[in-house]
Amino acid sequence: MKHWLKRSLLGLTGAALVVGSLAGCAGQRHGWHNASEQDRADFRARMVERVGSKLDLDAAQKQKLAALTDKIQAQRAALRSGGDPRAEFRSLFQGDKFDQAGARKLLDTKIAAVQSGSPEVIAAMGDFFDSLNATQQQKVREFMSRGRHWGRG
């Protein structure tokens, strides 16, 4: 595999994990399943500012990061559409036998949501990562190699 392609794919994956980790952890800590859309938008704006300050992003890069967070949020919403995912999963066990047809339908629905939204997420992630300079890309790689979040300060 060509060196630049390998680096680009690694960076793209890293950026996805960074944004996904931040959004996922914040949702669990603060009970985001009950938050309003305005609260979620405010959180995404704060997250863009925090990541922007850590990476020294310019306005155009922040705009691309914001677009990426919006795409990821839309993807998460599509995956959660149809109700409570845990309740949907528990419903498969309600009868005398496991509802295999229901499980296949649930899986097909989730796969379709991932397939329909993933190209936009990947494109937004590529736009964001490719807009970073070499120093910023290295910061993302270092963050990914540590396997933990940036500090609070």
Image (cartoon, rainbow, N blue to C red):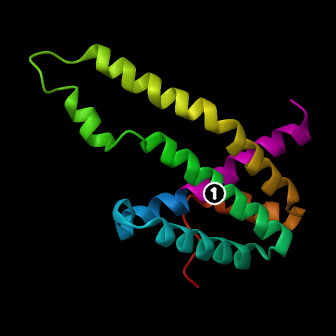
Instruction: Say which residue appears at 14% left-offset and 15% top-offset.
Output: 97
Q: Residue at x 85, y 62 (%)?
A: 132
Direction from residue 133 to residue 22 in the image, left or right: left
Residue 123 within the magenta-colored segment of the rendering = no
- 19 and 111: which one is in front? 111
Q: Name the quadrant containing residue 49.
A: bottom right
Disc 1 is placed on an element classified as: helix
Judge whether 130 appears above or below 139 on screen.
Answer: above
Residue 72 percent coordinates (x, y)? 60, 51
Residue at image position (55%, 67%) is 149
Vertical placement of residue 22 versus 107, above or below: below
Q: What amino acid is found at the position of numbered circle 1 in the picture?
A: Asp
Q: Position of residue 106 (x, y in %)?
A: 38, 26
From where the camera sits, is residue 90 visible? yes
Q: Can you say whether 125 is above or below 28 in the image?
A: above
Q: Is residue 121 left or right of residue 34?
A: right
User: Label 1 belongs to which residue?
Assistant: 70
Q: Residue at x 45, y 62 (%)?
A: 25
10 Å neighbourhood of mark 1: few (<14), some, or many (≥20)?
some
Where the C terminus falls, by quadrant? Answer: bottom right
Residue 58, can we see it?
Answer: no
Q: Main secondary structure of the magenta part?
A: helix
5 or 128: nearer the viewer: 128
**In this rendering, would 33 be left or right of 125?**
left
Q: Where does the image place residue 84, in percent across and percent down from the top left?
A: 31, 44
The magenta stretch is 1-20
Where residue 90 sits: x, y (%)? 21, 34
